[in-house]
């Protein structure tokens, strides 16, 4: 077997590139990052002194990279103090940065994904600027591999959804708890690998017990099926809708940030209202350092807080949604 083998995936290639660049060019910290809103997420790090770890999140607007992308500073700054945009960046007051390298990474659609970047606590020799073509080539190669990986990840997500048909809820045809757990585990791995955002929406029907008691379980089953159809119709094709308990539903909104999830929750509420189904909601975003399981727990807690609040106030229908752990 030849001693040169393809990389298994984008993270493996990124780790190898960072290690090679540090060995070749120095710099105490090399990173591959993802930008999502104002989150700047560390996906890979080759760190020799800064204490930065994978999964750590900083403010994108504080970074040198945000200024580099806006062309306010060069891609290589051997002495950052001589670049006004970098000298004024807030991150320079948080950590000691004497030299900087930053190259954009783009996804398959040509949009900014993140950066390949490096910092060093003291200025570097001016000669390092001559290495820009090498670093740009590394960034282009990583961007090319990233585009293929993201496409494959999307195909894998679709396949997982289809496979989960074997773990569906008999009454509604949605994912059951077992199917939900599998999908969440797979999506969490993608979020960690690529820095994708995600949100979880917890939904609990308000009237199931009353309907069962007054009209029988057949009527209760009909209520559950109406809710399932309404939620499925309002969710996007990539989202996951599951029934995880008797009257409990949960939606995984993939590649969705807290601002975008407001529109989704509005559609879910409207669809349930049109089906004459009353429900309580909880919404929580995935935090990079906590993961989707924690987001689900937060959304669930928010939903129960919302239900208690509505019962205490005597309100019978769901109020306008907010993208927070508790809705209403």
Image (cartoon, grey):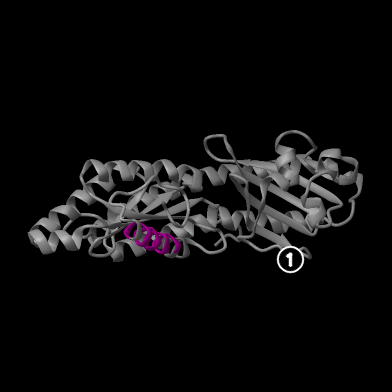
Residue drawn at x 56%, y 34% as measured from the top left: 110
* Magenta stretch: helix, strand or loop mostly: helix
Residue drawn at x 50%, y 43% as measured from the top left: 259
Q: In the figure, 280 relative to 38: above or below? A: below
Q: Position of residue 303 (x, y in %)?
A: 38, 59
User: Looking at the image, which is closer to me, 105 or 278?
Assistant: 278
The number of callouts visible is 1
Residue 9 visible in the picture: no
Residue 246 visible in the picture: yes
Q: Residue furthest front?
A: 313
Q: In the figure, 75 relative to 204: above or below? A: above
Task: Tell me the residue that label 1 is attached to.
Answer: 51
Residue 12 as seen in the image, left or right of residue 30: left
Secondary structure type for disc 1: loop
Q: Residues within 10 Å of mark 1 (few under 14, many from 20)?
A: few
Residue 82 as seen in the image, left or right of residue 46: right
Residue 23 as seen in the image, left or right of residue 262: right
**Image quadrant occupied by the N terminus:** bottom right
User: Looking at the image, which is closer to me, 133 or 264?
Assistant: 264
Q: Position of residue 324 (x, y in %)?
A: 48, 53
Identify the magenta region: 298-311
Q: Position of residue 233 (x, y in %)?
A: 27, 42
Magenta-drawn stretch contains 10: no
Quadrant of the image occupied by residue 127: top right
């Amino acid at each position: 077997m030849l001693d040169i083998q393809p990389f298994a995936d984008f993270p493996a290639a990124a780790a190898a590139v960072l290690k090679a660049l540090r060995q070749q060019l120095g710099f105490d910290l090399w990173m591959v990052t993802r930008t999502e809103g104002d989150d700047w997420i560390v996906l890979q790090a080759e760190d020799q002194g800064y204490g930065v770890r994978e999964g750590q999140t900083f403010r994108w607007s504080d970074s040198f990279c945000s200024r580099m992308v806006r062309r306010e500073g060069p891609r290589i700054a051997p002495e950052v103090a001589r670049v006004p945009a970098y000298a004024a960046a807030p991150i320079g007051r948080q950590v000691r940065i004497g030299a900087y390298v930053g190259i954009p990474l783009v996804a398959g659609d040509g949009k900014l994904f993140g950066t390949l970047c490096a910092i060093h606590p003291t200025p570097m020799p001016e000669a390092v600027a001559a290495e820009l073509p090498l670093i740009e080539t590394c960034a282009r190669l990583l961007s090319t591999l990233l585009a293929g990986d993201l496409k494959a990840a999307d195909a894998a997500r679709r396949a997982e959804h289809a496979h989960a048909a074997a773990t569906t809820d008999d009454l509604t045809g949605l994912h059951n708890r077992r199917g939900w757990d599998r999908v969440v585990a797979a999506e969490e791995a993608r979020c960690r690998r690529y820095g994708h955002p995600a949100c979880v929406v917890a939904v609990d029907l308000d009237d199931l017990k009353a309907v069962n008691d007054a009209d029988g379980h057949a009527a209760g089953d009909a209520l559950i099926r109406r809710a399932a159809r309404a939620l499925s119709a309002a969710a996007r094709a990539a989202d996951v809708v599951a029934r995880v308990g008797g009257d409990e539903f949960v939606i995984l909104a993939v590649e969705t940030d807290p601002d975008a999830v407001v529109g989704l929750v509005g559609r879910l509420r409207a669809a349930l209202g049109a089906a004459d189904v009353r429900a309580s909601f909880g919404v929580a975003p995935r935090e990079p350092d906590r993961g989707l399981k924690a987001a689900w727990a937060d959304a669930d807690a928010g939903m129960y807080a919302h239900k208690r609040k509505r019962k205490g106030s005597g309100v019978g229908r769901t109020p306008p949604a907010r993208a927070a752990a508790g809705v209403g």
